[in-house]
Image: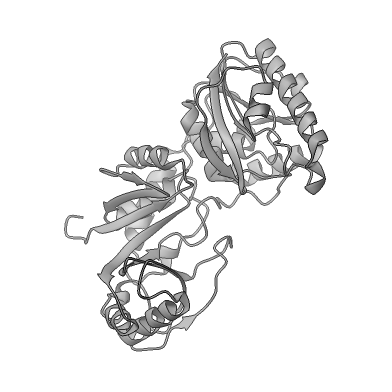
């Protein structure tokens, strides 16, 4: 391994989760991860890059920082792009997608930057590459995605290693209202300090993302085990190393979750979706899903309530907006707080709230919030012990 080249890498994550992602990378054997705005910088060999894509539960994508240089003219940009070692990763004539951003630089036209990078790739590989557009949310995306950032005339070229964003585990095909991203659900679980020997309950489970992610954690199932990645198309993809990592992941798998994991929702369609998703994830037998109102929950043992209640913004669509909807949501939160105090004594509570008023409606004393975004909505991640 010591003879392999070492790469500068960047784990992209939702703003607010940088330190949590850095902690997760340390647990994966990454030395000295450095949290910065929007992600975590780290360095490693190809095996580390593979491992983070396979195992990280909170990262959205992993970028390989291919080259950095100064470029003040388009001619200089093309010349230096053509001197970049694209052949280590791309094949001659391949399709590529490029996202270029320019800030405080002499080169301000992102289209012109994209054109020069593309021509530099073609010149280096000796065969014209084709520029294609890609939907970064596409679950099957496998294109050669290149990110170019020009700031103060300093150009950074990065190559996406992940393909489709990492929150696409492959199991969530059935959705309920306002689905929660898998990466955010996992971040909530990890941040709460939950361990698999304690019970977990989500009384607003929707499509089942939080219970499913908890079951994956409890059984030590690699979140990327059932999907493919962009690095698999690289010229230097090490199939033997990847196969070894998959074998290690399979050997770490536990046969069942050690403690109770429950998910409930009053919507029958949500429970149906939850069960279908959990079945695809291979953890249906590890989770007890129940169709019931929050007042009818039946917690088992002592553990963590981790949940994403309605915000009164998007639930039910546009008609959910307005003063009446907010009043209904605050009543729901007040009822939720009463149920927790009555049925979940000594439990830890971690939840997302749309604003301080709905959070306060629970009557619970939460600690300082972690400000996050869920589906474009600003939310507060708050926790307390009952």
Taking the spot 36% from the left edge, 81% from the top edge, the residue there is 121
Taking the spot 59% from the left edge, 38% from the top edge, the residue there is 379
Q: Residue 54 in the image: x percent, y percent?
A: 43, 50
* Figure check: 129 above or below 71: below
Taking the spot 32% from the left edge, 50% from the top edge, the residue there is 41
Q: Which colour scheme is used?
A: one colour
Image quadrant holding the C terminus, namely: top right
Residue in front for this viewpoint, 76 or 11: 76
Residue in front for this viewpoint, 382 or 178: 382
Residue 56 left/right relative to 284: left
Q: Residue 361 in the image: x percent, y percent?
A: 69, 22
Residue 245 left/right relative to 205: left
Image quadrant holding the N terminus, namely: bottom left
* Figure check: 263 above or below 249: above
Residue in front for this viewpoint, 42 or 310: 310
* Figure check: 74 above or below 89: below
Q: Which image quadrant is residue 319 in?
A: top right
* Figure check: 284 above or below 134: above
Q: Residue 246 in the image: x percent, y percent?
A: 41, 50
Q: How many numbered discs sit on the rendered protein?
A: 0
Residue 246 in view (yes/no): no
Taking the spot 26% from the left edge, 43% from the top edge, the residue there is 32
Q: Residue 321 in the image: x percent, y percent?
A: 78, 42
Residue in front for this viewpoint, 104 or 333: 104
Residue 100 left/right relative to 48: right
Residue 370 in view (yes/no): yes
């Amino acid at each position: 391994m010591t003879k392999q080249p070492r790469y500068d890498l960047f784990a992209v994550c939702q703003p607010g989760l940088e330190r949590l992602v850095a902690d997760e990378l340390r647990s994966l054997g990454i030395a000295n991860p450095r949290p910065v705005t929007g992600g975590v910088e780290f360095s490693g060999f190809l095996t580390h890059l593979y491992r983070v894509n396979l195992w990280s539960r909170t990262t959205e994508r992993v970028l390989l920082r291919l080259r950095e240089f100064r470029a003040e003219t388009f001619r200089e940009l093309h010349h230096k792009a053509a001197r970049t070692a694209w052949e280590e990763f791309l094949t001659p004539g391949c399709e590529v997608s490029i996202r270029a951003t320019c800030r405080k630089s002499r080169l301000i036209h992102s289209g012109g930057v994209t054109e020069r990078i593309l021509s530099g790739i073609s010149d280096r590989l000796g065969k014209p590459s084709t520029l294609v557009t890609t939907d970064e949310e596409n679950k099957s995306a496998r294109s050669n995605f290149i990110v170019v950032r020009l700031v103060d005339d300093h150009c950074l070229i990065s190559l996406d290693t992940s393909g489709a964003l990492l929150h696409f585990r492959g199991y969530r095909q059935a959705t309920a209202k306002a689905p929660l991203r898998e990466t955010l659900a996992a971040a909530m679980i990890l941040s709460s300090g939950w361990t698999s020997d304690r019970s977990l309950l989500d009384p607003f489970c929707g499509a089942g993302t939080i219970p499913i992610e908890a079951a994956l954690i409890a059984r030590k199932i690699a979140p990327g085990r059932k999907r493919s990645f962009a690095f698999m198309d690289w010229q230097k993809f090490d199939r033997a190393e990847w196969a070894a990592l998959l074998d290690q992941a399979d050997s770490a798998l536990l046969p069942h979750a050690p403690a109770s994991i429950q998910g409930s929702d009053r919507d029958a369609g949500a429970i149906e979706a939850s069960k279908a998703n959990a079945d695809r994830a291979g953890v249906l037998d590890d989770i007890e899903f129940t169709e019931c109102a929050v007042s009818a929950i039946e917690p088992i043992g002592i553990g963590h309530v981790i949940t994403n209640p309605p915000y009164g913004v998007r639930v039910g669509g546009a008609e959910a907006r307005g003063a009446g909807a907010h009043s209904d949501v605050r009543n729901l939160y007040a009822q939720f707080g009463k149920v927790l105090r009555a049925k979940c004594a000594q439990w830890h509570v971690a939840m997302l709230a749309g604003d301080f008023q709905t959070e306060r409606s629970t009557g619970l004393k939460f600690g300082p919030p972690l400000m996050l975004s869920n589906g474009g909505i600003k939310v507060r991640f708050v926790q307390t012990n009952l």
